[in-house]
Amino acid sequence: MPLPWREWYGAVRAERESGGSLLWTRARMGSSLATGARGRHGIRSALSMTPMPTATLVARDWAEIQERMLVPLYEAVYDRLEVGPGDRLLGLDCGAGLALLLAAGRGAVATGVEADPARRALARERLLEVLAAPPAAPLGNRPYDALLAFSPAPAALAAALPAVRRGGAVVLADWGPAERCTVPSVLGGGPAPRDLDALVERAGLRPDGSGRVFCPFGYADADSAVRGLLSTRLYDGVADPALAEKELAEALHPYERPDGAVWLPNIFRYVIARVA
């Protein structure tokens, strides 16, 4: 199995101090995706013989490989909001629910919204309450204290706001400055970060602070890097998925370390606003 997210987060923090191989030693020991007999660049030969994954497999790649990359962001936001027992949180686009689990670990009651059926099913396997669409009114008739909307669509944000109490926190997050983010350059210049401040203004929210978080995307090998990045849905809708997969694998070569691990440093920015 890939390295559990708690160990992963601890390794990320240790990496900041060591600047060395600790993260990748642990990641490779805990990963079932090690390169093995195929060698460092075996992914190139494997691409032609690997069928395109189903939606369920892509969702599992998100849950097992990619979702944990955002743990530093989730933790920073929860620390900033002082999330704790009794707080009620609503998370938009919650994926397989890792952000909800982190909130629940602090004693909060967390509900998620996830439109993708495969991701929603994985979140429910974790015994999380996850809806297919934002609730028209708070569940249990008690408003939510906070809304977590990482990189939200404006329509989804607007649909969820009525469920948040007056004065409740709304957290929006997206990529930081282009020069501090590796992934957009690997993906050929996209995705561009949203203007979070403009989104706050259009939604009629009151600004209440912002922050930046170091969120490295780190993988034990190129195979897991390709699978993880493809699971983000940033490549959805491409005309030739197999070609996109091959081009992504090639684009990752400059970011491979001598042991075959892939390291993509990124900065994420978040803003906090309040419901008027």
Image (tube, rainbow, N blue to C red):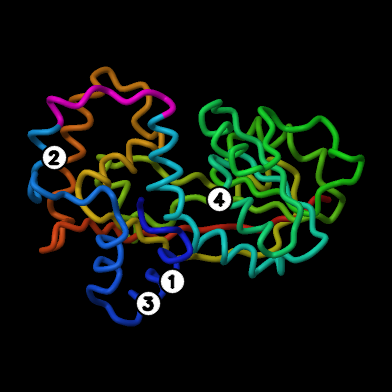
Does 179 appear above or below 200? Answer: below
Q: 254 or 59: nearer the eye?
A: 59
Query: Distance of mark 3 from mark 4, alpha carbons?
Result: 21 Å
Left or right: where does residue 172 sit relative to residue 245?
right
Q: Which residue is mark 1?
A: 10
Q: Amino acid at mark 4?
A: Leu
User: Is residue 128 or residue 274 the one in the foreground?
Assistant: 128
Instruction: Report helix, strand or loop for mark 1.
Output: helix
Question: Considering only order in the chain, which callout, 4 or 2, is on the residue closer to the N terminus?
Answer: 2
Report which residue position mark 4 lands on.
Answer: 98
Which is more N-terminal, label 3 or label 2? 3
Q: CA distance from mark 3 to mark 1?
A: 6 Å
Examine the rendered structure and indicate whether residue 194 appears above or below residue 257.
Answer: above
Circle 2 residue? 43
Mark sitting on residue 14: 3
Cβ atoms at labels 1 and 2 below 8 Å apart: no
Element at badge 3?
helix
Count residues near mark 1 (Cα–Cα under 10 Å), then give few for <14, some for 14-19, many for 20+: few
How far from the left and from the top, in percent, is residue 71? Answer: 50, 59
Q: Mark 4: which secondary structure?
A: helix
Left/right of residue 80 with respect to residue 53 in the rendered view: right
- The segment highlighted magenta reads 47-56
Sequence-first tag of 1 and 2: 1
Cα distance in 3D space between marks 1 and 2: 28 Å
> Which of disc 4 and disc 3 is earlier in sequence?
3
Q: Are marks 2 and 4 in contact (CB under 8 Å)?
A: no
* Percent position of residue 217, x then y: 34, 56
Q: Is residue 225 magenta?
A: no
Residue at point 45% right, 48% down? 67
Task: Mark 3 and mark 1 in contact? Answer it, CB < 8 Å.
Answer: yes
| Residue type marked 2 | Ile
